[in-house]
Image (tube, grey):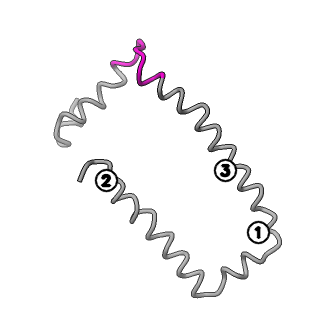
């Protein structure tokens, strides 16, 4: 199992279990239908979707090109910025903090 698969395997239970617990409690209490039918909750959904879409668009439009530029080009602060990353990758965790 690679590092990406391992981090994904750790991410799913850390986020999925609390959400599943909240959903199970809400379904057991019968509160889901009550809240979803509320007029204020229905009115808040378009604003929430608009905010989410704007944030996603901004992150993709600004973040992806900036990440490509930072990854491919050399800059004056690149070596000191990357040094802790490379040191933590090449050393055991017990020695990584001592740099």
Foreground: disc 2 or disc 1? 2
Say which residue appears at 38% left-offset and 19% top-offset: 78
Q: Note whether 5 is above or below 36 in the view shown.
A: above
Is residue 13 shown left or right of residue 28?
A: left
Magenta range is 69-79
Are the residues tagged 2 and 3 within 8 Å (C-beta)? no
Residue 87 x %, y %? 23, 30
Is residue 55 shown left or right of residue 85?
A: right
Residue at the disc numbered 2 = 5
- Residue 10 on the magenta segment: no
Q: Note whether 40 is above or below 75 in the view shown.
A: below
Q: Residues within 10 Å of mark 1 (few under 14, many from 20)?
A: few
Q: Residues within 10 Å of mark 2 (few under 14, many from 20)?
A: few
In the image shown, does 98 or 37 lie closer to the viewer? Answer: 37
Q: Residues within 10 Å of mark 3 (few under 14, many from 20)?
A: few
Are the residues tagged 2 and 1 within 8 Å (C-beta)? no
Residue 17 x %, y %? 44, 70
Residue at the disc numbered 1 = 41
Say which residue appears at 22% left-offset and 36% top-offset: 96
Say which residue appears at 40% left-offset and 16% top-offset: 77
Circle 3 — which element?
helix
Q: Earlier in the sequence, mark 2 or mark 3?
A: 2
- The CA span between labels 2 and 1 is 37 Å
Q: Earlier in the sequence, mark 3 or mark 1?
A: 1
Circle 1 — which element?
helix
Foreground: disc 2 or disc 3? 2
Residue at the disc numbered 3 = 52
Residue 23 picture quarter: bottom right
In the image shown, does 51 or 87 lie closer to the viewer? Answer: 51
């Amino acid at each position: 199992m690679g590092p990406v698969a391992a981090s994904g395997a750790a991410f799913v239970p850390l986020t999925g279990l609390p959400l599943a617990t909240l959903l199970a409690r809400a379904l057991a209490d019968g509160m889901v239908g009550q809240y979803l039918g509320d007029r204020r909750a229905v009115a808040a959904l378009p604003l929430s979707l608009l905010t989410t879409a704007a944030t996603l668009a901004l992150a993709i439009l600004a973040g992806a090109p900036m990440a490509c530029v930072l990854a491919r080009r050399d800059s004056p602060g690149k070596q000191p910025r990357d040094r802790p990353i490379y040191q933590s990758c090449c050393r055991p965790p017990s020695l990584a903090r001592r740099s």
